[in-house]
Amino acid sequence: MTLLGFIVIVFPLALWAVPQHGVLANTVFYIVLSIGSGSFVALLGLVYLKSLLFPERSPRGTAAGGKARLEAYKTWSETQDDARKVEKQLRSVKGGALHDFGYMARIASLLITVFVLLNLSTWAFMHFYYGSTEIMSAEARWQLLHPDSWDWK
């Protein structure tokens, strides 16, 4: 993961610096290249340090006696229990994610329904109150909106 992170950081910067021209582009390119090389060397050093600090429990090729075999079985049993716990937790996370997704889908469908109903009811009210543009002329709509109470024509 660390190596992948370094690759993700270093290569876009190096690719950005290559097509540029001038002293600044060369400087950025060499800085990025030296940081990338240094991080790779640091990664190898950290791997070596980890192997020194945390050696393998049972070196390969050693025969396991009765007590060592019992200890290995207990360790295996614990790892199986841990695996079951993790699997159960993942299932619960998956179920929670599905529940959240369903909740968001219900809220979105409610908002879409309210939006469509508001637009449809507004259109129906305008169509009923002001009249249809296909049926009534502009003058007829004007007469509907502004009735002539004194009957002046």
Image (cartoon, grey):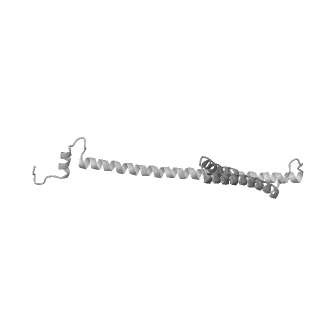
Which residue is rendered at x = 31% and y = 48% of the image? Answer: 123
Q: Position of residue 127 (x, y in %)?
A: 27, 47
Seen in the image, is 44 located left or right of residue 130?
right
| Lateral position of residue 128 relative to residue 18, left or right | left
141 horizontally vs 26: left or right: left
Q: Which residue appears farthest toward the front when viewing the image?
A: 22
Q: Is residue 90 visible?
A: no
Q: Residue at x 43, y 51 (%)?
A: 110
Count the numbered circles shown: 0
Front position in the image: 43 or 109? 43
Where 51 sits versus 19, above or below?
Answer: below
Q: Nearer the viewer, residue 67 or 14?
A: 14
Q: Point out residue 3 in the picture as x, y percentages from the top left corner.
A: 70, 51
Residue 100 can be seen in this image: yes
Task: Write down the quadrant of residue 52 in the picture.
Answer: bottom right
Q: How far from the left and from the top, in percent, is residue 139?
A: 18, 46
Whole-percent x, y for residue 72 in the image: 83, 52
Please say if 68 is above or below 132: below
Q: Nearer the viewer, residue 57 or 55?
A: 55
Side of 134 where 11 appears, left or right: right
Query: Residue at the bottom extreme?
Result: 53
Please give the name of the residue rendered at 74% of the width and 55% of the height, measured from the top-left corner. 42
